[in-house]
Structure formats: C-alpha cells, structure tokens
Image: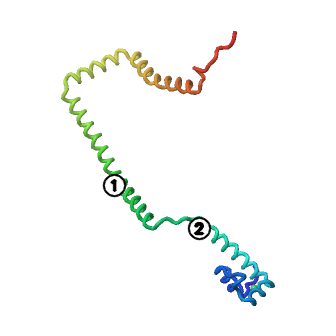
Amino acid sequence: MAAACEFEAEVLAAAMESRWPEGAEPQLREHVSTCGVCSEAALVACTIGGDRDTLRPAGAIPDSGRVWYLAQLRARREAIAAADRPITIVQTMALACATGLLGACFGATSGWFQATVERLTALVASHALLAAGTVVLVLLLPVAIYVAIQQEGTGTISGGRRPAG
Ligand SMILES: [Zn+2]
C-alpha cells in the first residue's frame, strides 16, 4: 500500500465539495500534480462525485405523506390477514365437527339408513369381483379422460392424418 500523504485529506475534501480543481488553493494543485497518492485520490473522488451528481435526479423520492399512507395501508392489511388466519382455522374445525356430529346422529337414529348400509355391505360381499371392477373403472375413467384431453390438446388424436394409400 502506498504511503499516505499529508495533503490527501485536503484533496478529498476539495473534491467532495465540488471545488476541485478550480476552487482549490494553487499550492495544493501544484502538490497534486507531483504527488501520486493525491492525484489518485482526486481522480477517484471526482469520479464518484460525478456519478453521484448524475444519479441524484434519476432517483425520484416520493412524497413523505404518500410513503406514510402506503405504509399504514400495508400494516393494516397485514394485521387483518394475521387476525383472519386463526378465525378461519377455527371456523373450518367447527364446521368439520358439526358435520361429523350430524352424520353420527343421523347414522345412529335412522333405521332405513342402517338397513340400506347392511344391504349394500351384503351386496358388495357377495359380488366382490364386480365391486372391485367398478371401483377400478371409477378410478381409471377420469385418468383416461384426462390423458385423452391432453393428447387432443397437443393434436396427436384429432390432428392425426391417415397414411396415404
Ligand atoms: Zn500528496
């Protein structure tokens, strides 16, 4: 690292205050023309200062009242969302509990429902192979339809051409 020069701080101050080289003392300018450390410091400081002056108008700072208003809106929205989350969870759990309770009461008290369930169970037990086939069909039919729609979308079925001859 190059040795520091005693005038480096003065050169930097002049450059940062935008008075380099015209506004600086003649002795300082003469020193900088002979000192490598100070000439580098002046070059770097002037470059950074020029960039700062160039970029300052580009960054439009919004009105402080608008920033405050938008921050208040955002804080309110986040508070409402944070308060709504547990309420939604509790409502969902209450609905699930009520549905389960209603179903249990209906199943325990309805005679025709119990008889229907017993008949269905006996029917499924006596026709196990048919029931299994129906279940497989019900599960596979949506998949087959989905695959057919996908292939139609890419044009492999509807856009297919017959070979000539
Ligand atoms: Zn120097």
- The answer to whether 39 appears left or right of 87 in the picture is right
- The answer to whether 121 appears left or right of 138 in the picture is left
In percent of width and height, residue 160 lies at 62, 19
Q: Which residue is mark 1?
A: 83
Seen from this angle, which residue lies furthest top? Answer: 165
In percent of width and height, residue 122 lies at 30, 18
- Quadrant assignment, res 70: bottom left
- The answer to whether 76 appears left or right of 7 in the picture is left
Q: Which residue is mark 2?
A: 57
The amino acid sitting under disc 1 is Ala
Q: Relative to 42, say whether 51 is above or below.
A: above
Which is nearer the eye, 27 or 105?
27
- Quadrant assignment, res 23: bottom right
In percent of width and height, residue 131 lies at 39, 18
Query: Which quarter holds ligand 1?
Result: bottom right
Dot 2: within a 10 Å radius of its alpha carbon, few (fewer than 14), some, or many (20 or more) residues? few
Quadrant that contains the N terminus:
bottom right
**Residue beneath the point at 47% across and 23% down:** 140
Q: Relative to 123, say whether 19 is above or below.
A: below
Quadrant that contains the C terminus:
top right
From the viewer's perspective, is the residue at label 2 or at label 1 nearer? 2
